[in-house]
Image (cartoon, rainbow, N blue to C red):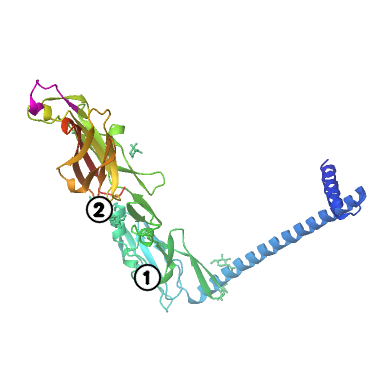
Amino acid sequence: MTRGLIIVVTAFLCQLLVSNSQQDCPSGQQLHGYLRQVHKLLSNHETAYLKSVRSLKRKLTLLQKAQLNARNYSRNITACPEPEPLANGRMLGSVFRVGHEVHFLCSPGFELLGSETRVCLNSLRWSGQQPACTRVDTGINNDASPLVTMSSVSLPASPPPPASVSTFVRPSRCIEFMGSTHCTCEPGYSVYSQDKSLCTDIDECEVFPLTQPGRLCLHLCVNTAGGFYCDCPSGYNLSRDGRNCQDVDECANGMHNCTQEQVCVNTFGGHNCIDIVCPPFRKATYIKTSPLRCERNPCVMGDETCLQAPLSVTYHFMSVVSNMSAPRVLFRISAARILGDTIRFGLLKNRGAQQFAVQKSGRQTGQLVLMNPVQGPATLDAEVEMTELERKAQLGRYITKVRLFVSPYSF
Ligand SMILES: *[C@@H]1O[C@H](CO)[C@@H](O)[C@H](O)[C@H]1NC(C)=O
Ligand SMILES: *[C@@H]1O[C@H](CO)[C@@H](O)[C@H](O)[C@H]1NC(C)=O
Ligand SMILES: *[C@@H]1O[C@H](CO)[C@@H](O)[C@H](O)[C@H]1NC(C)=O
Ligand SMILES: *[C@@H]1O[C@H](CO)[C@@H](O)[C@H](O)[C@H]1NC(C)=O
Ligand SMILES: *[C@@H]1O[C@H](CO)[C@@H](O)[C@H](O)[C@H]1NC(C)=O
């Protein structure tokens, strides 16, 4: 079936070729011949390939054997006897030749007595005394926190680590072949320059500092034995990628203590519970018409002072990150309906007012602009006043109180 198909296709191709080259088309028998040749060619290739794989395997086996021999040979003539295993502890270092060191490390809760480091001497004996691990009996919790462990460990850059051997130092895996040693380490470790039989932890956090592009973490990088992890400030969760920080919306997930009357405002890294109290204006009274809005009660006829008071006071809360680029428009205010012939927007004096500017951005629209980047943490307030005029007489005033919560972080 398959062959039949191939022939059909080939024949079709042939006809195409013929129309171009004006040659005779091969017969069915000739086609069979071609196919047989192609098949033979392919199987020759396959055989050659298998042969080279087999030869490669053979070479590898030979290499391994040579390596083992070399190790046995070198041990015989220049090596110290294998040190006794350490109960309740571990030995680091697997090369026992003259001049090499081994290190001893006790399990948590045990203390090392004897030599922490022993060197294979020319006399083919180990220096120092065989160490032992004895139990320590303190009420103190022996679990060192990762941060403490980290700070007590010397990194590859600084000289010999043996005094503080820990899981930040591990034995390397070495092969000796034709007189040279090649050592490798587990992922996250690199061969210690002063003793190839040891691997020292790679401090990924130092290799990729937070202040440079290619950093590993957005906020905090914690080096661990053989790895690292990222951490975030409180109020943030580590995002799914394990490197970035995501603000936790305490207002949305119910992790806040705000009362029913308060307004919960989520900020980057926290939240605020805010009491909205309608402001006092002389001779005017206000009523809350929504959680974020106060409206003036009707004035007594002819009470000019009351009539000059704002018709409404609206509250607006915004949360931004630190050092946000500026100038930038924070928000726009529009008059819903126009009664007068002119609308004016203005910034009332307030805390942080020098950071803001108010601009008219349309016939009935004004915008609040943040003029300079703000370093958090900070809370800035601004009041924007919108005034409606009719033939230069004031028809109404509306006030928008803006509070800007600036995060301590740039996220
Ligand atoms: C190398 O020595 C080990 C024991 O130390 C032995 O089991 C192994 O067979 C030796 N290898 C060779 C290739 O002689
Ligand atoms: C190494 O020691 C083994 C036994 O441990 C021995 O059979 C072998 O001959 C020694 N090789 C050398 C080169 O001394
Ligand atoms: C943040 O983490 C906490 C606890 O680890 C979890 O309860 C909460 O749902 C997380 N929030 C988000 C937004 O992922
Ligand atoms: C809420 O209140 C409780 C008790 O008053 C307090 O322990 C907790 O820290 C508060 N939580 C927040 C998010 O403020
Ligand atoms: C703020 O941002 C600018 C550029 O966006 C940057 O050069 C500057 O270092 C930042 N400052 C701080 C304190 O993060």
Q: Is residue 220 visible?
A: yes
Which quadrant of the structure image shows residue 134?
bottom left
Q: Which mark is residue 137?
A: 2
Q: Position of residue 137 (x, y in %)?
A: 25, 53
* Label 2 within 8 A of ligand 3 by Cβ: no
Q: Earlier in the sequence, mark 2 or mark 1?
A: 1
Q: Position of residue 138 (x, y in %)?
A: 23, 52
Report the front residue among 242 and 137.
242
CA distance separating discs 2 and 1: 27 Å
Q: Position of residue 182 (x, y in %)?
A: 51, 69
Q: What crowding class fits label 1: few (fewer than 14 Cα within 10 Å), some (14-19), or many (20 or more)?
A: many
Task: Describe the element under mark 1 as helix, strand or loop.
Answer: strand
> Would residue 135 be found to the left or right of residue 315 on screen?
right
Ligand 1 quadrant in view: bottom right
Report the front residue among 328 and 231.
328
Q: Which residues are magenta?
A: 294-306
Residue at 33%, 49% in the rendered image: 231
